[in-house]
Image (cartoon, rainbow, N blue to C red):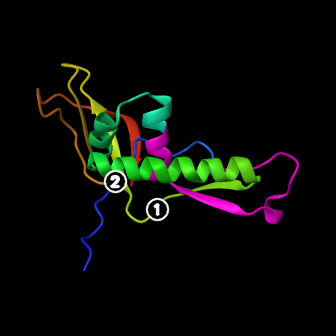
Amino acid sequence: MPRPRRCRWVLAEPRVMCFKPRGLPMRSLDRVVLTFDEVEALRLADCEGWYQERSADSMKVSRPTFGRILAAARGKVADALLHGKALVFETGASVQRLVRLRCPGCGFEWEMDADEEVNNCPACGRAVKAIDTEVRG
């Protein structure tokens, strides 16, 4: 029996949920589905220029797993671009929303699950507010 799939942490949802060739109606196009973890892998490796080890740490997966996610994402993007297909972004199987917090007093930053409530900085105890909401999946 295979091991259960680990939750993959994603920094942010894509701003748009699909891309398609110009001038063609969506209903007439084949679709390629990219999950949020694949979009995040592309963002970290290709946009941010991070090495796979750092990217894997950010997504809370192993380096080989990150490499497989990235290879799958690049293959799907190439397929969509070369064959005129629509790219559609979907959440995927296991998504975790996070909130990034920063203390206005001491500057301490940390991440936590968006469903948890926090009112005070763990470093100095001062009241805090969320600075960024994240989706990790």
Question: Relative to 110, is 12 on the left or the right?
Answer: right
Give 64 or 35, whichever is nearer the viewer: 64
Q: What segment is highlighted magenta in the picture?
A: 18-42
- The structure residue drawn at horizontal position 49% and vertical position 41%, both measured from the top left corner, is 42
**Residue at the right extreme?**
23
Image spot of residue 102 (x, y percent) = 27, 28
* Secondary-structure class at tag 2: loop
The residue lying toward the viewer, choosing from 80 and 87, is 80
- Residue 128 rendering spot, x and y as whole percentages: 26, 31
Query: In this picture, is 16 found above or below 86?
Result: above
Q: Quadrant of the C terminus?
A: bottom left
Identify the residue shown where x is 33% and y is 52%: 65
- Residue where numbered disc 2 is placed: 8
Do the numbered discs 2 and 1 sit on residues whose CB atoms are within 8 Å? Answer: yes
Q: Residue furthest top?
A: 106
Residue 117 position within the rendered picture, expressed as x and y whole percent measured from the top left: 25, 48
Task: Look at the image and tell me in which quarter the N terminus lies.
Answer: bottom left
Residue 120 lies in quadrant: top left
Quarter of the image holding residue 121? top left
Taking the image as shown, residue 124 lies to the left or right of residue 50, namely left
Give the number of the disc on residue 92: 1
Q: Is residue 50 left or right of residue 85?
A: left
* C-alpha gap between disc 2 and disc 1: 10 Å
Residue 126 lies in what quarter of the image? top left
Instruction: Kindly tell me whether residue 9 is visible in this rendering.
Output: no
For residue 105, say whether it is visible.
yes
**What residue lies at 45% left-to-right and 47% top-to-bottom?**
70
